Amino acid sequence: MRVVLLCETFSPKMGYLQNLLPKYMARLGTETHIVASNLLPYHQRDDFARTYGKFSGGSETEPGTVGTYEGCALHILGHRRVLGHIRLQGLRAKLRAIRPDVVQTMTNVGWIGLDAALGKATLGYKLFTASHHHASVFPLAAKSLPVWSAERMRCLASRTIPGALVSLATEKCYAITGDCADVAARFFGVPRSKLEICPLGVDTELFHPAVDHGGFTKSDLLRGELGFSGNEVVCIYTGRFSEDKNPLLLAKAVAHLALRGEPFRGLFVGDGTQARAIASFPACVTRPFVPVRELGDYYRAADIGVWPTQESMSMLDAAACGLPIVANDTMSAPERLDGNGLAYRLGDWRDLARVLLVLRDRDARRRLGDCGARKMELEFGWDSIAQRRLRDYEAALGGKKSSPENRTSRELLERAE
């Protein structure tokens, strides 16, 4: 079976689905191709240069590049912005050269979804899409507006109708949570009969608890380098330091506890507009973004993982490293806290401080952390998620596991290698 994952952006430093799902598919013996534009993740944000510029180096991969990534062929295409959405240049020719059995997109709206649906008619592959839009980052989901309102009509024209057309050619649309499925059905034109909830996963090779003397020693050394003592309770946040993520809320809670003489410290790994305010608190330490391969070391050097507002894949990674997770009480993915974390009242840093105090107890942290690590290993490992996707692909192909030999596709892989 030959699979192509279409995505708008790609960066080898990140740990997103477009990095990890193809990695594990390739390990399962599937010929896997990643096709992406030459844009970097979050390119569309106004604060991209401020937040991610140092980490990414501001460099985009050259269009036309064919390389390898974790056993997959990586194809970089140019792009154009058409009616507010990114369109991959030369996508039809690239798909014709690869001749995939299955194409998986990261979304069903926009030009990538539409072009993948059009390509299916002539190339004959099976098309699968996805929905990663949480209600918390899609404001229209929380508004009660009449269908004829300007905002709803714009959504109908730009998302619902195009999404419905793509869905006609789609086998399944994978929503990563229940609220993502609801957004896809209500606003992106996906029939509920074609929606299936399939969570994001964890690369348990990178994210796992410290289990031996070497692992504990490495964690202790990193804590020392960061300025934390062994008896301090280190709360870690990783990601964008922005108003929508609002890690400053955690900094305020930690600072409040520290002023009361409680042994709490904050560790913030990332960058963004709140960086200076966070760093102004003596109890808090900030570090720039690190490549995904180094991130597990920071989780294992901490005691509690905290994401104050929006959902994040990092919650899963931290839980896999044995950290209890704290998130807000409106989070739409409760499975990320079930049995392995606690919720606080959204936006209330005093309530966040109250919840953190509950986790001052080492045994309480260990109990929740152990539960989370087991859950991530058994239910959220990318290996099992890749197997699940491949079973769906094979079923759509009528049990077909491999394509007839295609010289062009084979040459692309060999050239990439």
Image (cartoon, rainbow, N blue to C red):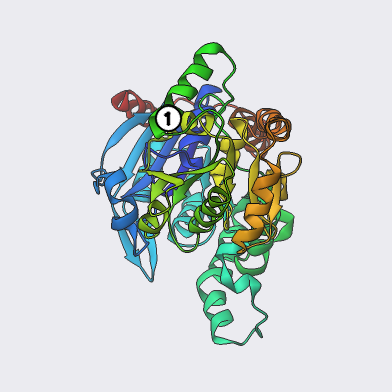
Give how far across and how far down residue 122 sits, in percent: 47, 50
Residue sitting farthest toward the top:
213
Indicate left or right for 360 with 20 as reference.
Answer: right
Image point 48% across, 42% down: which residue?
16
Secondary structure beneath disc 1? helix
Image quadrant of residue 46?
bottom left
| Residue 178 appears in the figure | yes
Indicate left or right for 205 with 362 as reference.
Answer: left
Depth check, front residue: 165 or 143: 143
Give how far across and how far down residue 141 sits, in percent: 63, 70
Q: Which residue is mark 1?
A: 293
Give how far across and how far down residue 129 sits, in percent: 57, 51
Image quadrant of residue 351?
bottom right
Depth check, front residue: 416 or 272: 272
Image quadrant of residue 413?
top left
Mark 1 residue type? Arg
Viewport quadrant of the N terminus:
top right
Image point 53% across, 35% down: which residue?
21
